Image (cartoon, rainbow, N blue to C red):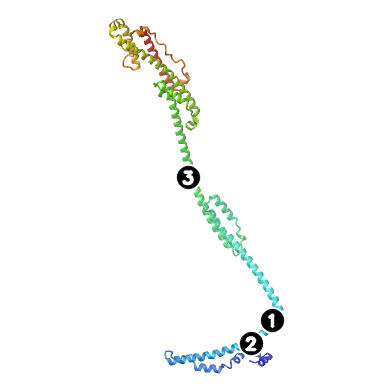
């Protein structure tokens, strides 16, 4: 295509050629025409006449392909050359047209951009709004996680909080999701609440049972403690009886031990004052027992000394004075022997206390012993009435003193004779 042809086409032929599509055959008329195409279709029909397994036919097919490539290459080269010329002209036309339309197009595009930006902004804000509401819906699921392992009151408060969530405030795109989520969360929380209430009821029963068992155990401990305290107090009251018949030294050692003893609340609890009173009474009883036992021991010691001296004297004078003493003292000895036998019988002794004979120079020259002093301070009748053990001890002491008095009388008679 030359410049003259272009100008001629611009003057009126171009539009006609384009509209009647005659430009395409014109461009490629040097390479191929409709006649050429008919000849080629006739030369190479659709039904293949060559056998590719035959070497000659295969070579013929190669030549056909080469021929095809030459034609298509020539057509493509023509197209490229023609397109370059068209592009230069089209660019000029486009530039001129743009100048004509520019004011309208720029105004349109500016407004179009503004509208698109506004739509994008609205879409972004809506997406952020929807994202925020989706997050709020998702956060409702956290309520069930928070309530795991919690008590029923905590779950009830959570249910109330979830129930206050206003699903109507959600966008129409998300409102159904919010309603369904809230419903499922409330159902799950109600199930957790019922389970927690049941577990708490079981735990409350266990706690009540534990408290009852603890109360019973505490009562048993208190009863046992009270029994132990009572046993200790009874043991303390009976302490004088445990020392009845023991020596004055043993009784005094016990008195000193009790005097150094201080009752404590750890062992006696609320009975500490009572124990203090009982302790004072026991010490008083033991003191009296010590006094009486000391007197008994003194009398016994004196009697033992007299008996020992008597036995010594009797051994020395037995052969020389036996006949005379026996003749003179036979009636008296018989009388005293009977008396001492009675005394020994009361004391549970098998043999006479002072031997077969009371007569000796010692007895004749010795006055009756006066060292024993009967107990002149006795517990009051009220004390004895309040304490059976004290009353029994006093009775035993009274009996012992009567024995001592009888012994003294018998001994005095024997010495007087």
**Vertical arrangement, residue 331 with respect to residue 344, above or below:** above
- Asked whether, in this view, residue 243 is left or right of residue 37, the answer is left
User: Earlier along the polypeptide chain: callout 2 or callout 3?
Assistant: 2
Q: Is residue 403 visible?
A: no
As displayed, is residue 223 above or below residue 410? below
Up/down of 92 relative to 335, above or below: below
Q: Residues within 10 Å of mark 2 (few under 14, many from 20)?
A: few
In the rendered view, would you say 340 is above or below 153? above
Earlier residue among tags 3 and 1: 1
Q: Is residue 239 visible?
A: yes
Residue found 53% across the figure and 94% down from its top: 38
| Residue 185 left/right relative to 252 | right
> What is the distance, in whole Å, between disc 2 and disc 3 at their CAs?
99 Å
Of the two numbered discs 1 and 2 in the rendering, the one whose residue sits closer to the viewer? 2
Circle number at residue 86: 2
Crowding around mark 1 (Cα neighbors within 10 Å: few <14, some 14 to 19, many 20+) is few
Q: Position of residue 273 (x, y in %)?
A: 50, 27
Residue where numbered disc 3 is placed: 206
Instruction: Locate residue 66, reporting x and y percent.
Output: 50, 90
Give the camera-side residue of 286 and 348: 286
Q: CA distance from mark 3 to mark 1?
A: 93 Å
Q: Residue 116 shows which numbered tag?
A: none
Residue 335: percent from the left, percent from the top? 32, 8
Crowding around mark 3 (Cα neighbors within 10 Å: few <14, some 14 to 19, many 20+) is few
């Amino acid at each position: 295509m030359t410049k003259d042809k272009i100008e001629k086409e611009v003057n009126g032929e171009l539009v006609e050629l384009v509209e009647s599509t005659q430009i395409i055959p014109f461009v490629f008329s040097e390479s191929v025409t409709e006649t050429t195409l008919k000849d080629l279709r006739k030369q190479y029909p659709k039904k293949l006449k060559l056998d590719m397994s035959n070497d000659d036919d295969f070579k013929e097919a190669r030549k056909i392909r080469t021929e095809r490539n030459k034609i298509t290459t020539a057509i493509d080269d023509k197209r490229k050359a023609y397109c370059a010329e068209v592009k230069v002209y089209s660019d000029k036309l486009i530039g001129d047209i743009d100048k004509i339309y520019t004011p309208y197009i720029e105004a349109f595009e500016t407004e179009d951009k503004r509208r698109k930006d506004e739509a994008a902004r609205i879409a972004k804000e809506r997406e952020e709004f929807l994202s925020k509401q989706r997050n709020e819906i998702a956060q409702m699921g956290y309520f069930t996680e928070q309530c795991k392992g919690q008590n029923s009151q905590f779950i009830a408060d959570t249910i109330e909080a979830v129930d206050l969530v206003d699903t109507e405030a959600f966008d129409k795109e998300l409102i159904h999701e919010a309603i369904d989520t809230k419903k499922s969360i409330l159902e799950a929380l109600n199930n957790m609440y019922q389970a927690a209430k049941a577990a708490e009821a079981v735990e409350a029963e266990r706690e009540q049972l534990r408290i009852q068992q603890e109360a019973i155990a505490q009562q048993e401990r208190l009863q046992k403690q009270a029994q132990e305290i009572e046993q200790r107090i009874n043991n303390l009251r009976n302490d004088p009886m445990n020392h009845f018949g023991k020596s004055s030294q043993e009784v005094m050692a016990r008195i000193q031990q009790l005097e150094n003893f201080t009752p404590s609340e750890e062992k006696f609890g609320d009975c500490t004052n009572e124990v203090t009173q009982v302790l004072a009474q026991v010490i008083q009883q033991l003191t009296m027992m010590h006094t009486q036992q000391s007197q008994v021991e003194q009398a016994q010691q004196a009697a033992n000394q007299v008996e020992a001296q008597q036995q010594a004297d009797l051994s020395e004078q037995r052969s020389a004075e036996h006949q005379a003493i026996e003749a003179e003292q036979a009636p008296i000895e018989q009388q005293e022997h009977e008396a001492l036998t009675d005394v020994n019988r009361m004391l549970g002794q098998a043999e006479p206390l002072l031997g077969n004979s009371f007569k000796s120079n010692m007895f004749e020259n010795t006055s009756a012993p006066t060292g024993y002093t009967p107990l002149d301070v006795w517990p009051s009748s009220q004390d004895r009435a309040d304490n059976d053990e004290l009353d029994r001890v006093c009775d035993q002491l009274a009996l012992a003193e009567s024995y001592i008095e009888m012994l003294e009388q018998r001994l005095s008679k024997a010495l007087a004779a």
